[in-house]
Image (cartoon, rainbow, N blue to C red):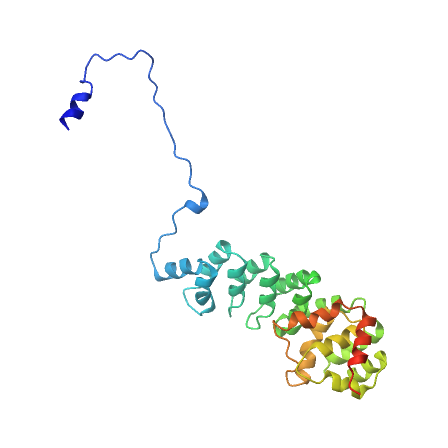
Amino acid sequence: MHALTAALPAPTSDFRANHPLYVVRTEAAPLPLEGLPPTPIRTEQDLVVQLARMPIDISAPLLKARLSMLDTQALLALVAATGEAHHKLIAGRPGLDWRVIRALIRSNSDEVLLTLAENHRLEFDAEDQAALARLSESRIMLRAAILANPRLSLAHNTVKLNLEDGLTHRNLRLVRLLRAGDTVRFMVGAANAIGCEATALQRFLTGASATPLAMTCRALDIDRAVFLSLLPHWQAANDGEPNCNAAHRPLVLSVFSLPANDARRKLMAALPA
């Protein structure tokens, strides 16, 4: 310590600078957004919201739970601060406020819109139903989900008109028969159009797979959007069969990559003798 003191110059009162001295004022650069400190946690709700903003594998149980702390304001904050994976889980929650529904619609994510339309525990106002119907014009799965959701009744007519555009008179009649639950007349009409026996087509369509019904629709030159809208009506008339879950759906829908004539040949070859 004494050596260090001895090395320093002695203070002097008659110091004169050879050049003018300037006072330099410096300002710290603002922190980037990701560098800002997190919102202070003052309440249990603050803690839940902070945890819900974490990566989806951590936050998923919270977003799926019916926690009173995740109220409308908290959910709106989460929608603003997170992305598609979080939005999809929020869209699957029951009883969402219209402001949260509208914020999720504005995300314009295919997966989020589909989750909203498949959520039968939500109430949609006229404006949101019109928005979903408009957004479904280029989204086949969304159109089918709208038609399957009784709480989207205001959107149904718009979507049905879109689906029926381009259908032949014969196919329009078949579609309306199946929507009315008249599966017998649908099968007779489909068999006549394809050129096969109605009893053989009936046996072909009986089973746990949705692929035969998809193949029949494709053979009739009915597209996959119409098929998806018809599937719930077929299931309702057949005790919930065939099952078409998320894992099975891509295989079923792959049928619609076939030209109608090829689908008809495959169907005829697959019919029971």
The image quadrant where one finds the N terminus is top left
| Image location (x, y in percent) of residue 96 | 51, 66
Kindly identify the residue that appears in the image at 64 percent across and 85 percent down.
239
The total of numbered circles placed on residues is: 0
Name the side, left or right, on which 2 lies relative to 257.
left
Kindly identify the residue that appears in the image at 29 percent across and 13 percent down.
17
Kindly identify the residue that appears in the image at 70 percent across and 62 percent down.
137
Please determine whether, in this image, residue 208 is positioned above or below residue 250: below
The image quadrant where one finds the C terminus is bottom right
Quadrant hosting residue 179: bottom right
Q: Can residue 160 be seen in this view?
A: no
Relative to the observer, which residue lies in front, 60 or 162?
Answer: 60
Kindly identify the residue that appears in the image at 48 percent across and 54 percent down.
81
Q: Can residue 218 be seen in this view?
A: yes
| Image location (x, y in percent) of residue 131 | 64, 61
Name the side, left or right, on which 210 lies relative to 58.
right
Please determine whether, in this image, residue 236 is positioned above or below residue 120: below
